Image: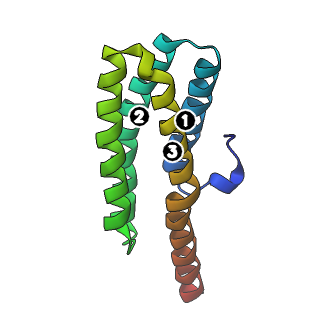
Amino acid sequence: MDWTEALKMGVPAIDGEHKHAVWLMDRLGEAIWARDPQVVCRLLLDVCDHFTRHFADEERLMAEVEYPMTAAHRAEHAEMSAWIEQAAKAVTANPGLSSPTAVKAIKWISDHLTNSDMLVAEFIRTKRAISMSMAA
């Protein structure tokens, strides 16, 4: 997955975190192709750390803008957080599991960024446009 302007939410801090997530996914893909389970394992631990912080930041943003689908979005975060924590522990114990686990993580992150997070972005853009038109 490549970082493109289309993935921007319009919130610089979150956009930076998403850009880093795309970078992590690219590194995971490279490590899978290189058949390097130790690097894949280390990167999965990095993904776990990154998304623990990122999900908290994104959930604060959704509360701040009063995003109406926050509960569903938060549930996706909780599901992925639980899965990635278990996966990181599993691949630490058995590096042979790292590649299939990384592929699943890449797919989930890609789907989440391009679908769920884009709904939040559209809500923010719409809310900003309404605020600007009311201020004019």
Decide: is 70 above or below 96: below
Disc nearest the viewer among 3 and 2: 3
Q: Which residue is mark 1?
A: 20
Q: Residues within 10 Å of mark 3 (few under 14, many from 20)?
A: some
What amino acid type should be assigned to the residue bearing mark 1? His
Q: Which residue is mark 2?
A: 50
Residue at (49%, 14%) from the top-left corner? 37
Report if the CB atoms under discs 2 and 1 are less than 8 Å apart.
yes
Q: Which element is circle 1 on?
A: helix
Q: Residues within 10 Å of mark 2 (few under 14, many from 20)?
A: some
Q: Which quadrant would the N terminus be assigned to in this image?
A: top right
What amino acid type should be assigned to the residue bearing mark 3? Ile
Q: Residues within 10 Å of mark 1 (few under 14, many from 20)?
A: some
Q: Which residue is mark 3?
A: 109
Q: Is residue 9 visible?
A: no
Tell me which numbered mark, 3 or 2, is placed earlier along the sequence: 2
Q: Is residue 36 visible?
A: yes
What amino acid type should be assigned to the residue bearing mark 2? His
Of residue 84 and residue 20, the one placed in the foreground of this image is: 84
The x, y position of residue 59, in whole percent, is 35, 56
Q: CA distance from mark 3 to mark 2?
A: 12 Å
Q: Quadrant of residue 82?
A: top left
